[in-house]
Every structure is written in structure tokens, then in C-alpha cells.
């Protein structure tokens, strides 16, 4: 009886079988990598804004406190976007003729809001609350990254649930003293944080908050 | 595998949900209703559909479009984005306004609750008040000013109207008629008075379809002048209701319910309520004694009672031995408690009954104690000024120009008036209304009305306390208030002040706020107080009440009252017409929440019905099951009956209600709307079509004839059986004193008596709970009267969609709370117990263990959580829930298309899509909000920080919520009471919601 398959098919079939496992695994890894990529999460992407507002200049170089503009961060779920009036508090004195600031002046004159492009967008079924995070010693830069170094703001974290859970499972790894929450340059080393985290966890009554209704309602 | 022992069901059971269950006859032994199985698919269709579904599942995916952030230019005062603000206002109602507290998110009102400072609310809000926020966003509201259906601008319209009115003004208003509803705005009353002063020959008519004039006529007969009566229920040990549904209807019902509930605590000094009524009402069905009585017999009943008490001479007896025995007991109890008793006559009772009730209260020395008389709160025209008078005037051609404010007489007038036909004889018809409805489309001009949440006004509460109504939002559709319209008319009427003397010159502006402020500025000035007007105004607006405006009680003395003249005795069955529990005369008919709220006792939604007693149904040859032709959950198969009153005929579906008096049929108003909107139109029948006159509330003989035509009612409580389980507990006060645990009466078959089943304890494991706060709820069945406020509160707070009649008949209603109604006793005169059932938040929750995707889980503080985004819609949880409280979005019930409805939704709650399970969350958004606030303020959560929506709305304070592990909290005190029990605890579910057994206080002499 003649051979149906050439002997080389032994190799082909082995490669195919083991390859299938490899391809499936690789596919899984690729999907996992994709949903965590900046393309899918929008992390690390800046957006065109009507006014190229620089956090580096205002928060970093000039050292304006975060709360000067984001006024409701300590007592509302939303940090709050500043009304045009807040911009004009300074810019009716300085850089009054700047072309870059024309949309701000137009908005102030016409009473029509500036429409900023949203950078941080959590899913609609997540009820994130800034005030409680600030009250429990989560610093701005912990989630928002090096804001003082950003020209145009970008999203620092992935905003995926696993990213939230890193801290919600073990807040002691990220927490800092309440008076350093708005400090853009706050840094600790691993061993310092271990010691500080344990102390603050006790002091602030921090718990691992991972039940669903913490964030989802 | 655990085998549950078979339960021996006692017949007849002590409590029954329906007549069918009581008789055990119609119980379907099959677990699933016919047709509940899989549809008839062949393999190819199935594979085809599945393939298409899979393909489509991926087709909709794409990148989300970037969003914009649009901050303010200048931030308004006190606005913090993400934090709601609360404003006090009031909802005008016939007979008195209810003070409200409205939650506003970034300028859009989302939720209405009661104003604790307002005497008619005390913090609670009824179904109607809470549903008003949906009425505000109703997309079917009139959106433009029209002249013969052509859209016109307000200023153009005014110019034209002025030309039309010029002649009228010169004639001192001859031929001008104004038609309004009950006016309880002092500003509007002053404006009308000014208008009548400027045009002395003009006439003002009042048409308030739900408030007949009997009460005032009766007061006039007994006291010599019309008065409003304010009841102080907490002061009364014995209360007699003469067809008065004072706990669930009328302007002061929220306060009544609160005061009544304070006297229903069995460990305190319990009061006793006797109810004599026709159509079973929430008040009558929770009474300690109830006598079903045809309205035609009420006069003689009250006359006999009055004679027994020495108010009337003459026969102190009635023919009916049951009624006679009842009178004996009531009269004795009233005499014993003179000065601590109260007789309340219902608004639809005759003038004679009202007069006698006043005379009895006076005789017993109740005035000044349990009841006070005040000057009427609604402004009234002098002389005969009813709708009937207007119709006659129109018929005589005396009305040249008619201005209709808000009311809809073409729908609400009795057919005997032929209002639409007579309206055609009027030359110029101008209407201000929320909807371009039956009346609106017959008028030349239609002006869209501003909703009370959109406009400034003022209103007087049932005890005379005035409130400033402040708007929560600018008019959505350029609506005008009645004040603006009248002001425009007034300015026309006063163009030549020299010719028309006596007109105050204060009315300068048409801006409603200024009109209202002008009135109160004058009022404030007349009070001569040192406080500036601005400070007074700000305080009044902020508090929601104008301090010191409650009316002084009048000193009254009853004159001798005549015995009622024997009225015509209806030869056959008597027709009883009453306003609907929530739609009233139909003004709220386009409100989906109210349409879908199961009516108290009948549990019908989306329809009105001809309601008869079981015995009457038998005489008609119809077997009195829950529905004559059976039905499933949500679906009640009945048949249409033809009601003939004189020459008028109407077909309505029959509903058999235990406790209804025999030989009578009740039909509710508010239905049969023709031109309102997509919710109301074509729903139910218009009872006015059977009415010859405005006062046809009862007394008409009606012929009931079965037609054999099948009809399906959407009824949320029909055919389920309790299988003898111990779900509701009811005890008498005597029994309670012997055993405060109020155990179920009927031995055998009750859950508490179930043998312990091995393995049950391990069936559901206790999840890890820990932490200082463990949420729990207690519901007092003795306080609940089944009014439905909590159901609407839940619907508003949790953005629960309306599903429509068809889905309700399939058992797909979405309301997270239901109020189960159980009857006990004889079918001709049963008692009812109402039981609000929502998610019980079991510590050992059966739903959690069966969810394949962990979409429902347990929080450490004891909540049974529902995470919508994980839910894949297997419905295993609903199947495994013994309480049947889980609701599944079978279809896309949430309306994504209508923009205005989106404004109402609570931004703190996820909007659910098709295919997702949902259920009561204990208002988790309010819990987390309170927790966060407490954490930010670095304190613990205090008792009272968290109030669930249902708890806040309940006028009887039957619902208590809080930390069940804190022995000092109200909820743990309630749970520690001996009469506290849980539902189906034999299943070891450990529910966090428990109930307090109802305790009633019957008169031992009546047995």
C-alpha cells in the first residue's frame, strides 16, 4: 500500500499541533496586550485643546495649587473644571493680548463656554469620587502622573479596573500624608513607603475596598 | 438533594391574595404557565438566528467618540458640580398645597421629596407629588402658543388678543367669563379680584372636579358659614370615617397618615378606627372595623348614628341588622370617648352627612381638640359659579369670551352637560394648559402652561400655611404661568385707568416673580414688622413656608341640624363614581409612573374597571374568581360589562373586589383620555360619560349586563399562591397583650411550623460580613396602608423604566418594590394587610450562589450587590430568589430616544439596558454618598445620615432603615420587638429586611 502522506508530514503535523497551542496562547497574549495598550485605553495620548493649556507652566513652574482651578476636588465627586472667570482672574492682567488666549477672552465676552476635549474618561458605570480619595491621602500624581511636567495633559494610568484595584487591594502601597496630597513632587522609595503606608493605613483607617458597590451602583 | 416536606394547606387559608387562591380552585398545578416554554424553533432557524446574533454582537463595536467638557463661564452661586442642591417649593393641590423639597442636579430637578417644615408634608410626599417631576419632563406637553393650531409668538398673540378684548373692556367685561380650578394661590386670587374689579360684569367660574361643594354646604348648614376642617388625628382615641379615605387622599393625607400611625403602636395607647364606606379604600381596609355600605344608605346610617348620640330626634335604627349592631358599638364608643373622638365625612358624601358629622363632633365636644374649623383655604367666587352655571350661561349665549386656566372641562365635565357642544357657542375661547388636550383643541388660542416646577407662584396648605412656589428650572417650552396670563389681561383691562377707577397700580410687570413678590410685599407691609421685605422673602422662599400664616381656629357652635330628606332609593344596582387614586380626574393621566402604579387593593394598572362585590358578580352570572376567566401573573382575564344609566351606556371591564358593597358598582374617573399624549390616550373608559350632572357621585341606578367580550386587565397580583406559608401576620390588640410575638393563627402548613430540614443550614453559606455598619430594614405592617408613595419614590430615585400594559400582563413590570395585598376574613367584608416587598438583602442570599458571572455578590456591610455590567442575563438569580424581587430587562425598557426624559434620571444610578437583571439596592447610592461624606468629614456615620427613598416618602413612617448591628439604632430597636419577623426564614436566608406584625384594635363588643 502506497504511503498517503510524505514522511515530512510527521514534522508538519507536530508543528501544527504544537503551533496551534502556541498561536492560541500568542493570540491571548496579543488580545491582553491590546486592551491594555494606549490605543485601547487612551493612556499617554494628548488631545488638541481649544487653548493649549500647559500644566507644566501653571502647576509646575508657577506652582499654582491644584485647587485654585479644580475647586471642588475636596468636596465633590468631580474635581471641577475651572470656569472661564478663573482664567480671566489672571489673564486680564497678564498676557492680555496673546493670540493663544483669544478663545478665553471670547468665551468671557460672549458668555459661551470653552469646550475642552476630555482626557480622563472613566466608564459610565463607575462612580469615582475625588473627595474621598483626597481625604484618604491619595495624591493627585498617584493617579494623574507627573502633571507638573506635562505640557498638554495626558492620561497617566490605564483607567482599567485592574489599575484601580492595584490600590484598592493594598492602599498602603500608594497612600501619602494628607498634607502632601497636592504636592506634585512627592516621592518615596520602596522601603520608606512600606513604613509610611503601614502607619497611614492605621491612622487614616484605610481598608481594602474591593466590593462591587464601592464603585458600581 | 434536599427534599422539602409537602405542606398541608389549610382550607380556607387564613390569608388570601385572591378569591381563586382562597377557594383553591383555580390553582394551576404546573410550575410554568402555558406558553412559557421555548418557542417552536427548528434547528436551521435556531442556528441562523444564533449566527446572526454573534455576527451582530461584534458589528456594533467601535471607538468611543471623544467627549467634551463644558465648564461654566462664571460659576453660579453655591453650585458644586456633582453635588445636588435642594430647594423648597410646594405643589398646589385642590384644597391645599403640599410643601416639597426638590433635588436638583446642575439645574435639573430629578427627585421630589417632602418638606419637613411644611405642615401638610412633615417630610413625606405622596405618589402624585413625587411623580410631578416626570410630568415636568413629559414630551407630550404643549410646546408652543397656537392660534387654531398655528404656532404664534407670545407678543404677537398679546397684540391680537388686546384688539379682541378692547370691546370687552369698554363693556365692563360683559360677556367675559373666566374658568379656573380651585384657586389656592393668594396672588392668583388677588389678581382675579382685581380683574373682576376692572371688569365688574365679568364672571368667574370654578370647576374642581375632585372637590365637590358638599363639605362647604354641610358646614354652612351646620355652622352658618363654609369652613375647612383640619383634623388632629393624634388627639382622637376613636375615629369614625364616613366614606372618608383620609389616610390616602385629600390635601392633608400625608399629615393624617403620620398622626394616625403614631397612635397605632400596640405598646402605646392605640386608637380605634371605624370605617363605613362603599368602595374599599386604603383607609377603610386597615380600619379596626369596616362596614361596607351602599352610598344610598349612608344618609340613613348617619342619621341613625346622630339620633343615637342625641344630635337628631327620630328613629335611631336602620333596617339592616349588621349596620344596626355597628351603630350600637360606634355610638357607645363615641360617647365613652367624647372630646377624644372624631367623625370624618368623606368629600363625596352629601351635604346632610357633612352637616351631621359636624353636629356630632360638636355634640361630643371634639371641636378645638381633635378637629378645628378654619376659613376655607381655596379662594371662591361669590354666588353660583359652578361649571353647570357656566354651561347654562354659554347655552344662553351670554358668554362671548371664555378664558380657561388649566382645567380640562371637555374631559372632566359630566356627559349630561354637553360642555363641548356649548363651548362651540362661545365666540372667543382662550386656554392656558399643560397639554393641548380635549379642551385645548376646541379653543381658538392655546397657551402652553408653565409647570409648577417651572414658575413662581404661591399656595396655601390645608391648614392655611402659605408657601412660596419657587421654580427649579426655566420653562422648557416657553410656558406661561396663570399669573402672567392674567396680568396680561389685567393690563389690557386697565389700559385706560381713568375710565376704570379702583384698579391698583401695583401690577407693573408681567414677570411672574415680580407679580408674586408684589403680593407678598403688600402683605409684609400690612404686618408692620421690623424685618426688611428682602429678608422676609428670602427666608420664606428658603424655608418653603411663610411663617405665621397658619389660620387661626374659628370658634364654632353647631346649629340644630335637620335630618336628611330621604333621597331617591335606587331601584337596582347603584353607580358609584370616584376620582382615581392617583390619576384623580385625569389630570395626571399622561404620567407613566402613575399609570403603572398598581392601584391600592385592586392592583390594576393601565385601566379602570367596573368594580363589584363577589355576590353581585354571582347575580350577574359571573363566577367571582380573581378574574372571571382566570389569568396568570400580571394578566387578569375578565369580560366587558355594559353599564346603562338612563340613556347613557358605557362598556368597562369587570373587576370583582371582596369588601365592595353588594348591589353597587364603582367606576373611577381619570381614564378614557382622547387627546393628551401617547401615555394617556385610549387607556380605560371615561366614567363621566355615565354622569348626568356634576354631583353624580352616587345614587344613579345602573344596569350591569355582561357582554361576553373578553378583556385582559394588567393586574400585578392575581394567581400566586402562598401555599400556606406564614407571610403576613395580623393580631388583635387583645392577642398582642397576651403574646406580643403575634404568632400566626392557623396551625399547620405555616412556615414557622415547618420541620427543620437537615442540610438547609449548609445550603447557602454565610459570606464574610464585617465592619461597624450592617444595613438592615424594618417595615411596620401595622402602619402601612398601601398608598404607593414608596413605589413611586423608588421609581424616581432609581430611574426605573415604565414598561407598558402589555409587558405588565406578561409579569415584566420593573418596579423594585411591590406592595402585596392580603385579604383575611369573609369575602363580603374582609380586612386587608399590605406588605411592601423589595429585595430582602439575605445574608445567605440564594441568588448569589447561582450567578455564573458573579454579577450579584455580597458587600461587607451586608448589601446584596448587583453589578449591572457583569450581568449576562441568565436570570438564574431571579429563579432562585424565594421572594421574587428581582426584575429583568426583557426588552429595552429605558427610553433612550426622548431627550427630555433623560433630564429626570438620577445621575448617581446606572441606566440599565436590555438583558440585565436589577433589584432593590437599599439605595446604595445614598449609602455610599453618606459614607464618603462622613469619611471626608473624618467622622463615623450617624443614625439618620442614610434615608432610603422609600423611607423618606412613607407618610406613616412604616419603613425604618439603618445600622442593624448598632443596638441604639431605630432599626435594631424595631427588629428587637417581639412582633418582628422575617419572610421565609425557614430557608435560612437570613433576610436583612424584616417586618413587624400588624396589630389592630377591634372593639370586643363587635366580636
Image (cartoon, rainbow, N blue to C red):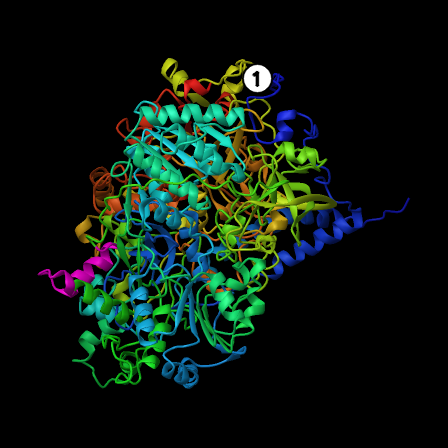
Res B912 seen here: no
Q: Which span of residues is magenta-colored?
A: B525-546
For this rendering, which residue is in front, A201 or B857?
A: B857
Q: Residue B671: x and y, percent?
A: 56, 54
Q: Residue A88: x and y, percent?
A: 22, 76
Q: Residue A211: x and y, percent?
A: 40, 40
Q: Which residue has dot 1 on it?
A: B749
Please identify the dominant SS of the magenta region.
helix
For this rendering, which residue is in front, B71 or B975?
A: B975
- The residue drawn where x is 46% and y is 37% is B282
For this rendering, which residue is in front, B88 or A100?
A: B88
Specify the farthest residue to the right.
A1
Please indicate whether residue B970 sits to the left or right of residue B413 in the image: left
Residue B742 figure quarter: top left
Q: Residue B48: x and y, percent?
A: 75, 53
- The residue drawn where x is 62% and y is 30% is B19
Counting every numbered tag in the picture gives: 1
- The verdict on residue B529 being magenta is yes
- The residue drawn where x is 22% and y is 56% is B546
Specify the farthest residue to the left.
B530
User: Against A143, is B434 above or below?
Assistant: below
Res B174 seen here: yes
- The verdict on residue B772 being magenta is no
Specify the farthest residue to the front.
B314
Please indicate whether residue B613 sits to the left or right of residue A6 in the image: left
Amino acid at each position: 500500500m502506497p504511503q498517503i502522506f510524505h514522511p515530512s508530514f510527521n514534522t508538519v503535523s507536530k508543528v501544527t499541533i504544537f503551533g496551534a497551542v502556541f498561536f492560541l496562547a500568542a493570540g491571548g497574549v496579543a488580545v491582553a496586550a491590546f486592551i491594555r495598550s494606549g490605543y485601547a485605553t487612551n493612556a499617554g495620548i494628548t488631545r488638541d485643546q481649544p487653548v493649549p493649556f500647559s500644566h507644566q507652566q501653571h502647576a509646575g513652574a508657577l506652582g499654582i495649587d491644584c485647587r485654585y482651578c479644580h475647586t471642588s476636588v475636596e468636596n465633590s465627586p468631580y474635581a471641577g473644571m475651572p470656569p472661564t472667570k478663573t482664567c480671566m482672574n489672571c489673564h486680564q492682567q497678564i498676557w492680555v493680548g496673546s493670540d493663544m488666549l483669544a478663545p478665553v477672552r471670547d468665551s468671557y465676552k460672549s458668555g459661551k463656554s470653552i469646550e475642552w476635549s476630555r482626557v480622563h474618561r472613566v466608564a459610565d458605570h463607575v462612580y469615582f469620587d475625588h473627595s474621598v480619595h483626597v481625604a484618604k491621602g491619595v495624591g493627585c500624581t498617584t493617579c494623574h502622573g507627573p502633571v507638573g511636567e506635562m505640557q498638554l495633559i495626558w492620561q497617566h494610568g490605564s483607567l482599567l479596573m485592574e489599575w484601580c484595584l492595584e490600590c484598592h487591594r493594598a492602599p498602603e502601597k500608594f497612600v501619602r500624608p494628607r498634607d502632601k496630597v497636592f504636592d506634585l513632587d512627592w516621592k518615596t522609595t520602596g522601603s520608606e513607603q512600606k513604613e509610611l503606608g503601614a502607619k497611614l493605613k492605621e491612622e487614616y483607617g484605610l481598608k481594602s475596598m474591593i466590593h462591587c458597590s464601592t464603585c458600581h451602583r | 438533594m434536599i427534599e422539602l416536606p409537602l405542606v398541608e394547606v389549610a382550607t380556607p387559608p387564613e390569608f388570601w391574595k385572591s378569591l381563586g387562591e382562597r377557594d383553591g380552585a383555580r390553582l394551576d398545578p404546573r410550575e410554568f404557565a402555558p406558553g412559557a416554554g421555548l418557542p417552536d424553533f427548528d434547528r436551521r432557524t435556531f442556528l441562523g438566528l444564533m449566527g446572526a446574533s454573534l455576527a451582530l454582537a461584534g458589528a456594533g463595536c467601535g471607538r468611543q467618540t471623544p467627549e467634551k467638557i463644558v465648564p461654566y463661564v462664571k460659576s453660579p452661586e453655591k453650585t458644586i458640580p456633582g453635588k445636588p442642591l435642594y430647594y423648597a417649593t410646594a405643589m398646589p393641590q385642590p384644597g391645599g398645597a403640599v410643601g416639597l423639597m426638590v433635588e436638583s442636579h446642575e439645574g435639573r430637578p430629578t427627585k421630589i421629596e417632602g418638606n419637613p417644615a411644611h405642615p401638610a408634608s412633615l417630610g413625606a410626599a405622596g405618589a402624585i407629588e413625587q411623580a410631578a417631576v416626570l410630568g415636568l419632563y413629559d414630551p407630550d406637553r404643549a410646546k408652543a402658543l397656537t392660534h387654531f393650531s398655528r404656532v404664534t409668538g407670545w407678543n404677537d398673540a398679546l397684540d391680537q388678543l388686546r384688539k379682541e378684548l378692547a370691546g370687552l373692556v369698554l363693556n365692563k367685561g360683559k360677556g367675559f367669563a373666566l374658568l379656573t380650578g380651585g384657586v389656592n394661590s393668594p396672588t392668583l386670587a388677588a389678581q382675579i379680584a382685581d380683574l373682576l374689579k376692572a371688569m365688574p360684569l365679568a364672571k368667574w367660574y370654578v370647576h374642581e372636579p375632585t372637590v365637590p361643594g358638599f363639605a362647604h354646604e354641610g358646614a354652612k348648614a351646620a355652622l352658618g358659614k363654609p369652613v375647612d376642617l383640619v383634623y388632629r388625628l393624634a388627639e382622637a382615641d376613636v375615629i369614625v370615617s364616613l366614606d372618608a379615605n383620609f389616610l390616602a387622599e385629600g390635601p392633608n393625607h400625608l399629615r393624617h397618615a403620620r398622626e394616625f400611625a403614631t397612635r397605632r403602636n400596640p405598646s402605646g395607647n392605640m386608637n380605634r378606627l371605624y370605617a363605613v364606606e362603599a368602595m374599599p379604600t386604603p383607609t377603610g381596609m386597615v380600619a379596626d372595623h369596616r362596614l361596607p355600605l351602599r352610598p344610598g344608605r349612608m344618609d340613613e346610617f348617619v342619621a341613625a348614628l346622630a339620633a343615637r348620640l342625641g344630635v337628631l330626634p327620630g328613629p335611631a335604627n336602620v333596617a339592616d341588622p349588621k349596620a344596626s349592631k355597628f351603630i350600637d358599638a360606634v355610638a357607645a364608643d363615641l360617647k365613652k370617648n367624647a372630646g377624644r373622638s372624631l367623625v370624618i365625612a368623606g368629600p363625596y358624601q352629601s351635604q346632610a352627612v357633612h352637616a351631621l358629622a359636624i353636629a356630632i363632633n360638636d355634640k361630643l365636644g371634639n371641636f378645638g381638640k381633635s378637629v378645628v374649623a378654619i376659613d376655607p383655604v381655596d379662594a371662591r367666587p361669590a354666588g353660583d359659579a359652578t361649571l353647570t352655571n357656566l354651561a347654562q350661561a354659554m347655552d344662553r349665549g351670554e358668554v362671548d369670551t371664555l378664558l380657561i386656566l388649566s382645567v380640562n372641562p371637555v374631559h372632566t365635565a359630566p356627559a349630561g352637560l354637553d360642555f363641548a357642544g356649548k363651548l362651540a357657542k362661545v365666540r372667543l375661547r382662550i386656554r392656558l394648559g399643560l397639554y393641548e388636550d380635549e379642551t385645548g383643541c376646541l379653543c381658538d388660542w392655546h397657551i402652553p402652561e408653565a409647570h409648577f416646577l417651572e414658575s413662581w407662584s404661591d399656595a396655601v396648605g390645608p391648614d392655611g400655611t402659605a408657601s412660596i412656589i419657587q421654580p427649579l428650572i426655566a420653562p422648557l417650552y416657553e410656558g406661561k404661568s396663570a399669573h402672567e396670563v392674567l396680568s396680561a389681561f389685567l393690563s389690557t383691562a386697565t389700559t385706560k385707568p381713568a375710565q376704570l377707577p379702583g384698579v391698583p397700580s401695583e401690577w407693573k410687570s408681567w414677570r411672574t416673580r415680580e407679580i408674586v413678590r408684589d403680593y407678598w410685599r403688600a402683605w409684609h407691609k400690612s404686618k408692620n414688622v421690623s424685618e426688611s421685605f428682602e429678608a422676609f422673602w428670602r427666608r420664606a422662599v428658603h424655608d418653603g413656608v411663610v411663617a405665621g400664616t397658619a389660620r387661626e381656629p374659628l370658634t364654632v357652635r353647631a346649629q340644630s341640624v335637620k335630618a336628611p330628606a330621604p333621597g331617591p332609593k335606587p331601584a337596582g344596582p347603584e353607580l358609584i363614581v370616584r376620582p382615581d387614586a392617583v390619576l384623580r380626574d385625569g389630570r395626571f393621566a399622561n404620567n407613566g409612573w402613575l399609570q403603572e402604579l398598581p392601584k391600592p387593593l385592586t392592583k390594576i394598572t393601565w385601566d379602570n374597571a367596573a368594580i363589584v362585590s363577589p355576590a353581585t358578580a354571582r347575580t350577574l352570572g359571573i363566577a367571582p374568581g380573581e378574574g372571571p376567566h382566570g389569568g396568570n401573573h400580571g394578566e387578569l382575564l375578565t369580560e366587558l360589562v355594559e353599564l346603562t344609566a338612563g340613556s347613557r351606556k358605557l362598556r368597562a371591564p369587570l373587576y370583582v373586589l371582596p369588601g365592595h358593597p353588594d348591589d353597587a358598582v364603582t367606576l373611577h374617573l381619570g381614564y378614557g383620555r382622547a387627546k393628551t399624549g401617547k401615555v394617556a390616550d385610549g387607556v380605560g373608559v371615561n366614567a363621566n360619560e355615565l354622569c348626568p350632572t356634576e354631583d353624580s357621585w352616587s345614587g344613579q341606578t345602573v344596569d350591569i349586563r355582561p357582554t361576553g367580550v373578553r378583556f385582559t386587565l394588567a393586574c400585578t397580583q392575581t394567581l400566586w399562591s402562598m401555599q400556606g406559608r406564614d407571610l403576613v401576620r395580623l393580631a388583635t390588640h387583645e392577642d398582642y397583650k397576651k403574646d406580643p410575638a403575634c404568632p400566626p393563627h392557623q396551625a399547620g402548613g405555616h412556615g414557622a411550623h415547618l420541620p427543620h430540614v437537615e442540610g438547609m443550614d449548609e445550603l447557602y453559606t454565610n459570606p464574610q460580613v464585617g465592619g461597624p455598619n450592617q444595613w438592615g430594614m424594618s417595615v411596620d405592617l401595622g402602619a402601612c396602608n398601601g398608598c404607593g408613595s414608596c413605589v413611586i419614590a423608588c421609581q424616581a430615585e432609581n430611574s426605573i423604566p415604565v414598561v407598558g400594559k402589555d409587558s405588565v400582563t406578561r409579569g415584566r413590570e420593573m418596579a423594585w418594590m411591590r406592595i402585596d395585598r392580603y385579604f383575611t376574613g369573609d369575602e363580603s367584608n374582609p380586612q386587608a394587610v399590605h406588605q411592601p416587598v423589595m429585595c430582602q438583602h439575605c445574608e445567605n442570599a440564594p441568588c448569589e450562589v447561582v450567578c455564573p458571572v458573579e454579577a450579584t455578590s455580597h458587600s461587607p456591610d451586608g448589601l446584596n450587590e448587583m453589578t449591572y455590567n457583569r450581568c449576562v442575563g441568565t436570570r438564574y438569580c431571579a429563579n432562585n430568589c424565594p421572594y421574587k424581587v428581582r426584575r429583568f430587562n426583557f426588552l429595552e425598557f429605558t427610553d433612550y430616544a426622548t431627550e427630555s426624559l433623560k433630564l429626570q434620571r438620577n445621575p448617581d444610578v446606572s441606566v440599565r439596558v436590555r438583558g440585565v437583571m436589577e433589584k432593590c439596592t437599599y439605595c446604595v447610592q445614598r449609602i455610599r454618598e453618606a459614607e464618603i461624606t462622613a469619611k471626608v468629614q473624618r467622622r463615623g456615620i450617624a443614625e439618620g445620615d442614610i434615608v432610603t427613598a422609600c423611607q423618606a416618602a412613607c407618610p406613616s413612617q412604616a419603613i425604618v432603615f439603618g445600622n442593624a448591628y448598632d443596638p441604639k439604632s431605630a432599626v435594631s430597636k424595631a427588629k428587637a420587638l417581639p412582633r418582628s419577623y422575617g419572610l421565609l426564614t425557614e430557608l435560612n436566608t437570613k433576610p436583612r429586611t424584616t417586618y413587624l406584625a400588624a396589630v389592630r384594635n377591634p372593639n370586643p363588643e363587635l366580636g
